[in-house]
Amino acid sequence: MFNDKETFKQVFRETLISKLGKPLEEASNADVYKILGNMIRENAGKNWADTNQKYKTDKDKQVYYFSMEFLIGRLLGNNLLNMGVLEVVREGLADLGFSLQDIEEVEADAGLGNGGLGRLAACFLDSLASLQYAGHGCGIRYKYGLFEQKIVDGYQVELPDYWLQNDNVWEVRREDKQVEVRFWGVIETREENGRLIFEHSQYEAVRAVPYDVPIIGADRRHVNTLRNWSAESITQPTRTFGSFAGSDYHKFLEYKRSVESISEFLYPDDSQYEGKLLRLKQQYFLCSAGLQSILRTFGKLGLPIQSLPDKVALHINDTHPTLVIPELLRILMDVHGLGWDEAWSITTRMVSYTNHTILSEALEKWPIQMVRDLLPRIFLIIEEINARFCGELMSRYPGDQDRISQMAIIHDDQVRMAHLAIVASHSVNGVAALHTEILMKREMRLFNEMYPHRFNNKTNGITHRRWLMHANPDLANLINQSIGTRWMSHPQEMIGLIKYCEDASFQEQVASIKRRNKLKLAEYIYSKHSVHVDPDSIFDVQVKRLHAYKRQLLNILHILHMYNQIKDNPSMDMVPRTFIF
């Protein structure tokens, strides 16, 4: 590892020549980013391998965080910070004639997430690695992010966000770890040695290939994994429907296109049937591929399948990965030969669920026929879960048909994913105290009455490394001067700043740092849009892609309200504001 500036410069020059065959004088910012990214990933590689070996040797319990989104952002600066070489690299690059800030701008924002749900997932991965927990992410490697947005002549224009066009220096393709995921088909049952066997035939097979991204903890030594799955066609299907031979060539192209669409877009438009079907495919693809991989890793420990809950925890971020539940039951029963009761006990001890939505109309539901057709075995298992759960409700609340209808997992020709997630989890949490309270007292009151110890709150936070130490180094340095550096690894130590709340000198320094940052933003806005903004105005910033989003609508209504106030009373006293969307 390069721990000093001169060593870094030497290694960088040598790597540039060996990898790209270019002298420093001919290197572009893109070349520098590519070489620097590869250097960091290779330096982290040994610790990555050591971390995984330690988990295997010590048989540590491992947490797998399933999420359809991981809004990880740009990783270069974050990784340099966590590896403790940010300043070394900044100074070394400056000596070589490059600006680290310019190099960071080369990196595409990973199109793996959209909003708070995805950022929460990314913060958890960062914290798990920094706290040296065995915790990994399971996601999808979307080819295109949500969309790239431009405003042209006052109109919103949405373009494909092809974030992978220049490759992703942080990921490693693991073709040897691929698994097969199956859709459609027919389920046939037969009895063998007194137990029911379920045979899946005439299915469509999809190849799931993982791309691993190292998640480097703040101590640099601890490196966990974000495993993103890519959907690829099987070119020589053996048991899929059709052989795609001869005149079936066009059928194969149709199959290939259908398969690759699974990992093509983050959140395909689901206003039509085909879009809904694609989303359901994405969700099962993630859950099946992730679980098969996890159970393969567990199998290397040489432990009985009954010890699975002692060694593996599965967390689902919102309802999108809820199919983890029936898929785990399928594997335990159909592959490992367990009975229902034992498989159910293992599953419920492994799964926990974060709820993000309290509006009942926004809770995820799927048409019964769609689930039955696309995932025939999974639907049978969901039906069985529902039948057993409704039986439990009937015995506990005899005659209360209204309660049973409200709580059933399958009702009104739909599968209610939040109900399935609650029934099969040992822990359900909201993401803010008020949210959890509404969940327990209103939206999920009946479930809270039935499972009074299952619901709990986990208030969302941020990672102070990215959003303070990296994003605002001047403020981080002032905190260091005031209370020391221990807060960097123990953020609760920032409570020590309370004693400075009446300190005039400290307040002036904070105000000075804030104004310098606002000047930087004002300069950036002018360079991009030729608009002058007043750095002494309040900067009211809302960061979100513009779309049909209630908070943006409320914000613009507030601006209209303030504008009308000024028109009605031009002499009113107010601090100037700059609204930035």
Image: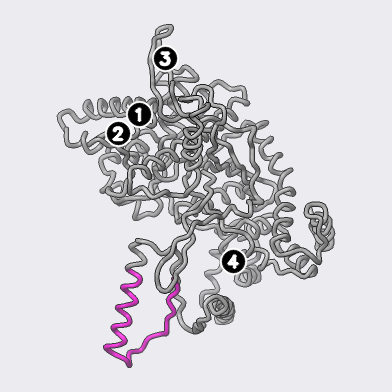
Q: Amino acid at mark 3?
A: Ile
Disc with the residue nearer the chain's start (4 vs 2): 2
Q: Residues within 10 Å of mark 2 (few under 14, many from 20)?
A: some
Q: Which residues are magenta?
A: 554-581
Visible residue check, residue 311: no
Q: Position of residue 348 (x, y in %)?
A: 42, 31
Compared with 512, 84 (above or below) is above
Which of pointers 4 and 3 indicates the residue nearer the eye?
A: 3
Which residue extends farthest bottom? 571
Answer with left or right where residue 75 lies relative to residue 337.
right
Q: CA distance from mark 4 to mark 2?
A: 47 Å
Q: Position of residue 180 (x, y in %)?
A: 53, 29
Q: Position of residue 529 (x, y in %)?
A: 52, 77
Visible residue check, residue 532: yes
Q: Is residue 499 magenta?
A: no
Which residue extends farthest top? 193
Q: Which residue is mark 2?
A: 368
